[in-house]
């Protein structure tokens, strides 16, 4: 027998950007699955990710060429206070598949967040590529689980077993922010009928 299970093949959402790929960090751009432009709404149609990459990639290239920074500008050195051991990666992936995967509920998402909180204790001082990848996966998993728990409806590719219908009251965008002290905060923004964000 060959085991078969659902798996993620596309990420809707990501780093919040404008239509020229600017993130909230000066000089840092995001495009494609990494970016959250809102171009796809709550779920993308097949093959549109290629067009998104081409269109927004070209826009970013033009913007970078028009706004080049001086080459002699110093770059801050990376520092880190939080790095997780690669040994937790498998448990992290299993927790997300089980509780925040295709079918989610309040109970499963709370259980996932509880597991993530426990895994946060598996710190390491060894800054390997695997440790950085595991830490990034952990942070992304936390943002996904927090947003999915907060959105009490089903919309696009987000399905909540306990809220199987879409609700017009939730025509909103949820943004997660991680502060430098390690605390998370959520921002909920209204979306106009033309799908632009109300500021």
Image (cartoon, rainbow, N blue to C red):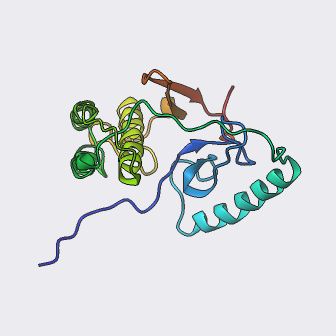
Which quadrant of the structure image shows residue 32?
bottom right
Label count reads: 0
Which residue is most to the bottom?
1
Residue at the image point whose x is 23% and y is 52% from the top: 90
Depth check: 134 or 113 in front? Answer: 134
Residue 153 at x, y percent in the picture:
39, 36
Residue at the image point whose x is 67% and y is 28% from the top: 198
Which residue is most to the left?
1
On-image quarter of the C terminus: top right
Residue at the image point whose x is 84% and y is 48% from the top: 68
Residue 2 at x, y percent in the picture:
16, 77
Depth check: 11 or 142 in front? Answer: 142
Query: Quick check: 168 left or right of 66?
Result: left
Residue 100 at x, y percent in the picture:
30, 44
Depth check: 164 or 191 in front? Answer: 191
Residue at the image point whose x is 64% and y is 47% from the top: 37
Depth check: 53 or 24 in front? Answer: 24
On-image quarter of the N terminus: bottom left
Residue 87 at x, y percent in the picture:
23, 49
Q: Indicate whether 59 appears above or below 193.
A: below
Query: Quick check: 110 left or right of 173?
Result: left
Which quadrant of the structure image shows residue 109?
top left
């Amino acid at each position: 027998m060959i085991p078969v299970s659902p798996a993620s093949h596309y990420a809707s959402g990501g780093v919040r950007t404008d239509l020229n790929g600017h993130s909230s960090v000066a000089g840092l751009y995001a495009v494609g699955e990494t970016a959250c432009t809102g171009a796809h709404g709550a779920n993308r149609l097949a093959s549109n990710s290629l067009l998104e990459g081409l269109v927004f990639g070209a826009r970013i290239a033009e913007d970078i060429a028009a706004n080049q920074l001086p080459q002699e500008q110093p770059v801050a050195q990376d520092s880190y206070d939080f790095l997780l051991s690669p040994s937790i990666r498998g448990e992290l992936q299993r927790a997300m598949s089980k509780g925040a995967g295709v079918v989610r509920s309040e109970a499963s998402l709370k259980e996932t967040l509880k597991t993530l909180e426990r895994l946060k204790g598996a710190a390491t001082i060894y800054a390997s590529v695997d440790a950085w990848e595991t830490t990034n996966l952990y942070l992304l998993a936390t943002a996904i689980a927090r947003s999915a728990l907060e959105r009490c409806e089903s919309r696009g590719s987000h399905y909540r077993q306990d809220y199987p219908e879409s609700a017009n009251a939730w025509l909103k965008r949820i943004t997660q922010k991680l502060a430098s002290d390690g605390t998370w905060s959520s921002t909920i923004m209204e979306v106009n009928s033309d799908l632009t964000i109300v500021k």
